[in-house]
Amino acid sequence: MEALGSALSCPVCMELFTPPVLLLSCSHNFCKQCLELVLVCQHCTHVGGQFCCPVCRKVIYLRGKGTNGLQRNILAENILEKFKEELERLHTKEQNQLAQMCEKHGEIMNLMCLSDEEPICGMCKIFGDHKSHQVAKISDAYAERKVSFAEDIQLVLQRSESAAQAMQEMEELIGDLSTSAADTRAMIDAIGDGLLSGIKSRIATLKRQLELEHASKLEKLRLVARELEAPRQLCKQMELLLRHHANAVQFLQQRKRLRAEMERLVEGSMSPQVPAKDTVSIRHYFQELIKGMDIAAFVTPNTNQVLPGSVRLHEAWQAGSATQGHLSQQALEDILWKAMSGSVPKTNEEAKLPWNPSYSSSASSTSKSSTQGRRIDERKARTSSLLPSALSAAT
């Protein structure tokens, strides 16, 4: 092999040829890229120039085509390809043999320690840590444990199938949690955008709390989901090992680890239970958002919009402020419409808010043109169609 490798090596780079391989008239072979470097070093830059062979110094004429006019040695390239394949095969064989060698004694591991369930060599049995242990031929242990390993896969597969329904419920819980979090986030945005700058810091705080709560609950659900997924992942690893293993030693070593995981899974504690549904409370965040606000100042006196489904939001609004007076459901609906649309001019009551001292008068609210009033009515009608879903989500 060494002699063949030397014959298939380039005299310039001293490595195996890199195709294409060019054959000169003096019968010496070179890598094309190496020969082009030789031409540069000999200042042969013309396609019709001449240069000397780096081995025998014979003058070679390019004849107007440069290196493309030189003969290509296809036979050497084919032999080189076969040689590389053989080198790769020998390397794989060597690695396989090394994997079956005992690291401590350098001997072939041809025995199986039945006490420790691991391959050993003869020196380990006679002088090593396994001299008092029972052993068996590694071929017999390999055949027996390969069969039992296939049976173990079936046990894990049954456990994985039993967890499929629970996994579906977990996915639904995660979807419900994400949906409720998205609905809560939409509610906070809709209400917060219509309020004055004094509560913007409160909105930001609530969003941070919501994200923390969502992340915390989602992490708990995902943790249970990963535990339910463990049997299926272990089953895949065991099937992959059963189908693809380089040798008996590798199989037995990996089998020991996977079997230990299988025993912990089958003989251990019961499967994790799917937790109860625990979504984000829109009602809680709504109460926190309006806590301590004089919401009567937001009411438009003349409102004709009466929307269904706002009873619980009305109760939450009332519970959010201990100091506010009675507020009708119709007034709450008007406030929600203002918060979501953001298009109604401020009223006299809004000028009385403690965080709005710069608002001078309400006279400007009556100076809108009739065209702008019609636009407001149209926008209010479009917004009203969206409010029932937002209100029903809070209940």
Image (spheres, helix red, strand yellow):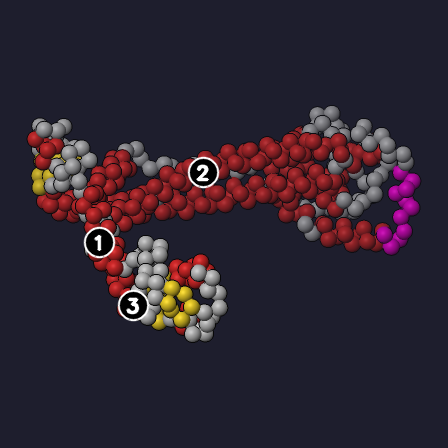
Of labels 2 and 1, the one closer to you = 1
Answer above or below: position of 310 versus 287: below
- The residue that label 1 is drawn on is 2
> Residue at the location (28% across, 62% down)?
80
Residue 17: percent from the left, percent from the top? 32, 59
> Residue 311 is drawn in which quadrant?
top right
Q: Main secondary structure of the magenta part?
A: helix
Residue 266 in view here: no
Residue 226: percent from the left, percent from the top? 39, 40
Tell me how far mark 1 sits from mark 3, CA to CA: 21 Å
In the picture, measured across the screen, residue 12 lies left or right of residue 389, that is left
Of the 4 image quadrants, the one containing the C terminus is top right
Mark 2 Cα-neighbour bin, 10 Å: few <14, some 14–19, many ≥20: many
Answer above or below: position of 135 versus 342: above
Mark 1 Cα-neighbour bin, 10 Å: few <14, some 14–19, many ≥20: few
Residue 149: percent from the left, percent from the top? 20, 45
Of labels 1 and 3, the one closer to you = 3
- The residue that label 2 is drawn on is 221
> Residue at the location (54% across, 36% down)?
214
Of the 4 image quadrants, the one containing the N terminus is bottom left
Would you say residue 367 sits in the magenta stretch? yes
Q: Amino acid at mark 2?
A: Leu
> Residue at the location (91% across, 46% down)?
367
On residue 27, which mark appears? 3
Q: Look at the image and give the residue range highlighted in magenta.
A: 362-372
Q: Nearer the viewer, residue 82 or 228?
A: 82
Q: Which type of secondary structure does the marked residue at label 1 adopt?
A: helix
Q: Amino acid at mark 1?
A: Glu
Tell me how far mark 2 sits from mark 3, CA to CA: 73 Å
Q: Nearer the viewer, residue 121 or 143?
A: 121
In the picture, measured across the screen, residue 158 lies left or right of residue 331, that is left
